[in-house]
Image (spheres, helix red, strand yellow):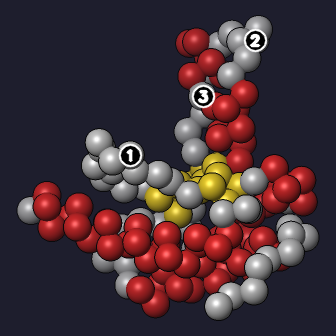
Amino acid sequence: RIEEHLAARQRVRRWYDERLRDLSEFVQLPIEEPWARHSFWMYTIVLSDAVAAGMTRDEFMARLDADGIETRPVFYPMHVLPPYLDRAARFPVADRASAQGLNLPTHGRLTEDEVEYIVSRIRAALQQASVVLPRRA
């Protein structure tokens, strides 16, 4: 049944992509290279520096949680974990992704209306971070 599960997650991904595309200035969306097939185990977004200046990732997640939306932070980079800790190491992309990234609900049973609600609350949280959103078509 793997193909059925993957197809359901791809459907959820398309719904997110369609609704978040106009916010690409504020949230970096996941990409799928032509040579790869993304499983969308998680749909990960990374908040822009402009958003992060007005609200931390954790504050953003707390606002979504207050609206009943469970999110997860992006994993910590290896160089900050105790077994691999290297205080001199500099990995700015990994550090930024960890500090500003979050995983949205992605399970295959999400409905289009649920994704619409999640995105509406993301828009509200972005406005609370003092960014000016584009007008929706």
State which mark lies toward you, 2 or 1. Answer: 1
Q: Tell me the crowding category of disc 1: few under 14, some 14 to 19, or many 20 or more residues within 10 angstroms, Cα based.
A: few
Task: Kindly identify which residue carries mark 3.
Answer: 77
- 3 or 2: tag closer to the N-terminus: 3
Task: Say whether residue 136 is left or right of residue 13.
Answer: right
Query: Horizontal and vertical percent for residue 64?
Result: 67, 72
Query: Horizontal and vertical percent for residue 107?
Result: 36, 67
Q: Secondary structure at mark 3?
A: loop
Quarter of the figure with residue 56: bottom right
Q: Secondary structure at mark 2?
A: loop
The residue under the point 40% across, 72% down is: 14
- 2 or 1: tag closer to the N-terminus: 1
State which mark lies toward you, 1 or 3. Answer: 1
Seen in the picture, residue 99 relative to 52 is either above or below; the reply is above
Question: Which of 90 and 134 lies nearest the eye of the viewer?
Answer: 134
Marks 1 and 3, how far apart at CA: 22 Å
The residue under the point 85% across, 56% down is: 50
Can you tell which mark lies on residue 87?
A: 2
The residue under the point 67% across, 32% down is: 93
Quadrant of the image containing the C terminus:
bottom right
Quarter of the figure with residue 22: bottom right
Marks 3 and 2, how far apart at CA: 12 Å
Task: Kindly identify which residue carries mark 1.
Answer: 33
Query: Horizontal and vertical percent for residue 29?
Result: 56, 58
Task: Say whether residue 64 is left or right of residue 104.
Answer: right
